[in-house]
Amino acid sequence: MSGRTRLTLCAWAATLLAAGALVPLVEGVGWLVQAALLLGAQSGVGALARRVPLARSLTLACQVLVTLVLLTLVFARDHALAGVVPGPGAVMRLGELLVAGGEDIGTYAIPAPLTDGIRLMMLGGVVLIGLLVDALAVTFRSAAPAGLPLLALYSVAAGLSDGGASWPWFLLAASGYLLLLLAEGKDRLSQWGRVFGGASRSSGGLADGLTGAGGGTSPVRTGRRIGVLTLGIALAVPLALPTLDSGLLSGDGPVRGKGSGGGTISAVNPLVSLQNNLNQPENREVMTYRSNIQDPQSMYLRILSLDEFNGSEWRSSTRRLTDVPDRLPQPNGLSGDVAVSEIRTNISASRSYQQTYLPLPYPASEVRVGGRWRYEPEGRTLVGDDGQTTRGARYEVGSLVVEPTAEQLAAAGPPSEQLAAEYTKVPDSLPSVVAETAKKITEGSGNAYEQAVKLQDWFTSDGGFTYDTTVTSGTGSQAIARFLRDKEGFCVHFSFSMAAMARTLGIPARVAVGFTPGTVKADGATSVGLRDAHAWPELYFEGVGWTRFEPTPSRGTAPEYTQPQVPTDDTSDPAQPSADTSEAPTEAPTTDSSCPPQLRQEGGCGPSESAGAAPPTDRGTPAGTVLLVVLGVALALSLPLAPLLWRTRTRNRRLGSAGRTPADAADRTLAAWREVTDTAWDHGIAPDESLTPRKAAARIVRLGRLDTSAAEAVHRLAGAVEQVLYAPQPRPASGLTEDALAVRAGLGASAGRGARLRAMFLPRSSVRVVWAVADRRTALVERWVNRPGHGRWTARLRRLSRQHG
């Protein structure tokens, strides 16, 4: 195995070992296998390009092109030209995935689910680091600086994982870097032999000098010292990075609070950084809707529920998905004794809002939406399949308005053993003060309903809590205790704490995440913005099902069944939806049903003539941004084709006819011969300037295995060149262009497919461009140095420097 091949393999292994530090950030390790394959293809292309050999810039361009094609094949095959070529559609798809990945990074806790967006960012980041390492260590033959991108990769992983990238991952990354340094040292030694360090002053004498034990410093020793220094930096840098607890990159949401100990929770937040949304200076619209609900203030749009609490985070359980049924089943636990009515809602999501879960009123009974969606029965949620998101979605929802009375909730029986075991589970790490506080607050309650109402009232009014979106205390086990002590937080803290306290009382509880009802606009539609992002607890009562509570002060509205009321017997056929249930979706809700009475009295509702959901005000990605992306991709694609374009232009210029004088005829002959020699060079026959034209022609015929017609064409061109170079009065030759093209066709016919493709797209003779640039640079430097007056100014500057010195 050659030294450069060994170095290429070590660069590949070092990048892959450093990428292992990213494993704790996401669920599963399948992406690492994909990264290994992509890195292998990228390194293989670099090795082939260096073997040609190509210029260093062309080697990098080939690797970038192949990497882009592979990423397109993996993530945007359906949008690519011929399934491989990254055209505008594929570029837009990759851009959408990157945007979605950025949102998912702020959405999910560590370890995050491996969505397509996150997977693209992970693979793209690793192959980018791999390209830098391969370029520095192999292409530019400098392995020591290659440790910097490896260090960046590990440091980012260590800073984000908050200890997840522990010392085993560090040892793997460090081993990869040291392996790279040792491979480079061995490669350098193989070129120069053993390093003679001079005679040693020890008893070993000359022998020690030969082995490197004397005063000389071998490259291997230098590499080891650089390695130790770099590894020391790698240990120090993560300590200086701030710990990010609520998402992969975002500092939003629950992060480590004051006080000692851990207990912070990185909540699964499908609203893309809930706390950050609540603190946005502009309440950017994410969706609009129209509904015929009688009480708009109870129109919560629910995304999903977080039903698993492990002490460090609340998250959604992994459950089986099914196809979306035409009619969703009856909600779990809902009996026929509870008053129910059905409403219709038309929703339009903004193109800037991309979420895997579909926001729905709860409990939905029917959903009409286009795209690829799946149904999760336990949480009654719709989940996007195969990259499906809410971006620009327009859909219609039929949902139930469940109106239990306080008497019905108070009379609810015990839940099933299976449901109680799952939804009353609390971690052993939950401090006893949480259960003690819950028991103290609900003392004297006669049933679970009274306990739940007392918990809600304590958070909203009796407990002295303050709503504050800038608080950074978490909602994990110890952090819940801190929140109960400090009494400052926002919806995440209130909902998670009430759910945990309800579970300690034996009440099944989970946390729902979604949006509050939003703001009614003048045209009768309701606008939902970023600041409407919200979280609330859902408690289970047998006979009623999962029931919303609102413990967050100044946010949302407390349900009517949690407020003091006198139960009435005025319920109409509670077993079925009310008479205003419609079999077909309404064109648009009436103004009376969608506008609050106060706003209607002021004349602010206006007519509601448009059917369906109001179009969102968000205009999506600006056209200028799309144009810049397309131009950037076109430029990136044109770079690898630059050798082909240059070679075609050069061939046309050489073989074109220009001028009729004898001097022009001589130039055409020499240009045609230069084209033939470059064509042979492109097919692997390097030019030999020491040979005469006749011997050079014989060499091209022999090595190129040319047929008779092509061989005769070469010899005719060689004879014409000899006439130009040596004859006193050269005779003008004819048919130069035809002979040159015949030689090109003969070389292509005798070469294999790989050689022909390489001669076309990666011609060896394109190195003349580099030579020409270097010559031009040298000429410019000489012209600058030899310009009139340059010596006088140089002498004056030297005198000034001596005076100031």
Image (cartoon, rainbow, N blue to C red):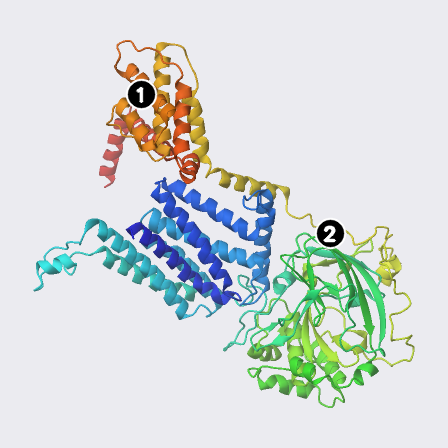
The reply to whether residue 233 is visible in this rendering is: no
Q: Nearer the viewer, mark 2 or mark 1?
A: 1
In the picture of the structure, the residue carrying the numbered disc 2 is 616
Q: CA distance from mark 2 to mark 1?
A: 73 Å
Q: Is residue 448 left or right of residue 253?
A: right
Q: Residue furthest front?
A: 708
Taking 438 as reference, is 278 above or below it?
Answer: above
Tell me the residue at 29%/24% (across/down): 789
Q: Is residue 49 left or right of residue 612?
A: left
Q: Quadrant of residue 401?
A: bottom right
Taking 342 as reference, is 439 above or below it?
Answer: below
Taking 129 as reference, is 295 above or below it?
Answer: below
Q: Residues within 10 Å of mark 1 (few under 14, many from 20)?
A: many
- SS at circle 1: helix
Q: Quadrant of residue 108?
A: bottom right
The reply to whether residue 540 is visible in this rendering is: yes
Taking 513 as reference, is 451 above or below it?
Answer: below
Q: Which circle's residue, 2 or 1, is located before the other in the chain? A: 2
Q: Quadrant of the C terminus?
A: top left
Q: Residues within 10 Å of mark 2 (few under 14, many from 20)?
A: many
Label ID, residue 693: none
Mark 1 belongs to which amino acid?
Ala
Q: Is residue 253 left or right of residue 184?
A: right
**Label 1 near label 2: C-beta < 8 Å?**
no
Of 51 and 510, nearer the camera is 51
In percent of width and height, residue 150 lies at 39, 58
Of 529 and 126, nearer the camera is 126
In percent of width and height, residue 785 lies at 28, 28
In the picture of the structure, the residue carrying the numbered disc 1 is 718
Mark 2 belongs to which amino acid?
Pro
In percent of width and height, residue 584 lies at 86, 59
